[in-house]
Image: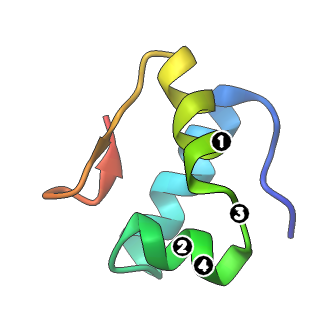
Amino acid sequence: MALPHDPIMLLSMVNLKLRDFYPSLDALCDDLDEDKAALCATLAAAGYGYDPVRNQFV
């Protein structure tokens, strides 16, 4: 399944996957073959950053 392009939908889906299926953002990106820098940049443009302690974008 491809990740959504809308930043808010992307945030919701990524945080759900991080919470339920992946121990880290690196694991999610490796498994889904996603560019970590591009994902972080998209969510940063919407005002969200990755918190590795919480394993969520906040």
What is the CA distance from the residue labelled 3 to the residue labelled 2?
8 Å
What is the CA distance from the residue labelled 1 to the residue labelled 3?
8 Å
CB-based contact (under 8 Å), mark 2 and mark 1 = no
CB-based contact (under 8 Å), mark 3 and mark 2 = yes
Disc 2 residue type? Leu
Location of mark 4 (residue): 30
x, y percent for residue 43: 54, 30
Taking the image as shown, residue 34 lies to the left or right of residue 18, namely right
Which quadrant is the N terminus positioned in?
Answer: bottom right
Location of mark 3 (residue): 34
CB-based contact (under 8 Å), mark 2 and mark 4 = yes
**Earlier-in-chain disc, 3 versus 2:** 2
CB-based contact (under 8 Å), mark 1 and mark 3 = yes
Identify the residue at horizontal 56%, vertical 45% (top origin): 37
Identify the residue at horizontal 49%, vertical 61% (top origin): 16
Is residue 19 placed above or below 5 in the rendered structure?
Answer: below
Location of mark 1 (residue): 38
Number of numbered discs visible in the structure rendering = 4
